[in-house]
Amino acid sequence: MQELFYDIKECAQQIYKTIKFDMHDSFYEYMGQGVGGDLSSKIDLFAEQIFIDRLQKYGKIISEEAGEVGEGKDLLIIDPIDGSDNLLSSFPYYGSSVAMQRDGKTLFSFIVNYANGDFYVKWEDFFKKGSLLHDNLKDIRTNYFAKIGLFEKAYANPKIVKKLKQNSYKFRSPGAVALSLAYAHYVKFVIFIGKIRAYDVEAGLHQCEDLFIYNDDTTIIVAKEREVFAKLLEIVGKG
């Protein structure tokens, strides 16, 4: 897993440098619809190709833009640019996510935030926060003082927004699901309600395994505290 980690980190560093220093106008162009259903920009395809070239030696790749690539026992599920609309709008909340599965079980995950270079990596008992800018790694710190949660696709769920407000739950809706799940240990909660695709959530859910999780075909709720989790289930109608 360590070799996989280093290869993914180097891919992410290459993408990060391109976004930071060489994001020319052509990267904003749309190149058609990807397998995941969204329009693919040239930066999506650029990032995807970097991951495919480096990671296909580890197994079959399933990526949001290209679909299935290569073959192998292990499966790598990739979102090349998580929050691409944010990136194309110069809103600093976007990244990449990679999950590796074997026999249907996720064994490894990596999620990076290109806006600040932070990444989160997990396998077995190894769960660390690092940076693309240096080699230091830190333990994940659970923050029980968080004031806000994250509600992805809040704009499409006004009734739940109203209930959260009635219960004095503050939140933000930043628009990058895997990245929001990566921050679940630091914020009060994470909610996602909408179409759930493997590219969006596999890495993030793997990194939330030690938290309270509700997950079905349309809804994800994650929280650190049992009382908050129970109240969110009630608010969302899953209690």
Image (cartoon, helix red, strand yellow):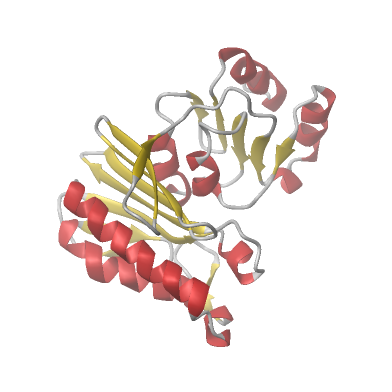
In-image side of 159 versus 138 (left or right):
right
Residue 60 location in percent, x, y?
22, 58
Residue 133 vertical placement versus 218 (above, below): below
Residue 176 location in percent, x, y?
57, 52
Residue 159 location in percent, x, y?
80, 34
Number of numbered discs visible in the structure rendering = 0
In-image side of 72 versus 75 (left or right):
left
Residue 70 falls in which quadrant of the image?
bottom left
Residue 48 vertical placement versus 176 (above, below): below
Q: Residue placed farthest to the top in the image?
A: 227
- Asked if residue 70 can be seen in this view, the reply is no
Q: Residue at x 67, y 69 (%)?
A: 89
In-image side of 154 versus 222 (left or right):
right
Q: Residue at x 60, y 30 (%)?
A: 189
Residue 160 falls in which quadrant of the image?
top right
Q: Residue at x 62, y 62 (%)?
A: 86
Foreground of the two, 239 or 143: 143
- Asked if residue 24 can be seen in this view, the reply is yes
Q: Quadrant of the C terminus?
A: top right
Residue 135 location in percent, x, y?
31, 52
Residue 191 falls in which quadrant of the image?
top right
In-image side of 35 versus 106 (left or right):
right
